[in-house]
Image (cartoon, grey):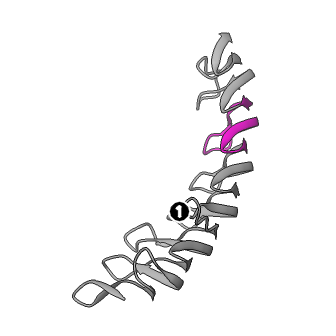
Amino acid sequence: LATWGEGVVRFEGAGRPRAEEGSWSLWYRDGQLRARGAYEDGLRTGVWETFYPSGGQGGGVQSRGERLPLPEEGRSPRQGPWSFWHPNGRLLRRGRFERGLEEGLFEEWHPSGQTKSRLHYRAGLLEGPAEEWFDDGSPRARGAYAGGLRTGAWEGWRGDGTRDPELTGAFLEGLRVSP
């Protein structure tokens, strides 16, 4: 147990910093819960939740997912399905991690709840089809990535529905090769 001062708890759990074990909880200076989860040999493991401070637009859960303890690497990367929320409580982003890197489909939403993007990843790099939308649901961009770079034909639009020349054209290794 450690405090911020004036009796406000900073963190609580078994062990000591850098040698934590079992269930732990961490708090903001104002006494609001900041995060909770478990440690194994000083590394985060299992399901972890983080929370927005109460000063946010309603507070609530910021992220939730599992941590993989990798003692040989001295880190605890995200592993498996993760979800992230906007301060207003609506889903922000959802996808899967493999040893801390994005893998497969990731979906993202605007604070209004409208779909913002659908992107595919391989080993943390953008790979495959990509779609993006404005907050009103109208399309923003559509194309594909290879190795984290734009590739092939891309279409892009401005908020008023007209073509966006910066996002439209043919791309090779991230560079525009034709309008």
**Residue sitting nearer the eye, 62 or 122:** 122
Quarter of the rendering occupied by the C terminus = top right
Q: Is residue 134 left or right of residue 58?
A: right
Q: Position of residue 166 (x, y in %)?
A: 58, 19
**Residue sitting nearer the eye, 59 or 106:** 106
Give the residue at x 72% y 31%.
Answer: 145
Q: Which residues are magenta?
A: 120-146
Q: Is residue 55 above or below residue 169?
A: below
Q: Main secondary structure of the magenta part?
A: strand
Give the residue at x 59% y 60%.
Answer: 77
Mark 1, residue position: 74
Residue type of the residue flagged with mark 1? Gly
Q: Is residue 14 above or below residue 95?
A: below
Q: Residues within 10 Å of mark 1 (few under 14, many from 20)?
A: few
Quadrant in which residue 2 is drawn: bottom left
Q: Position of residue 38 (x, y in %)?
A: 56, 80
Quarter of the rendering occupied by the N terminus = bottom left
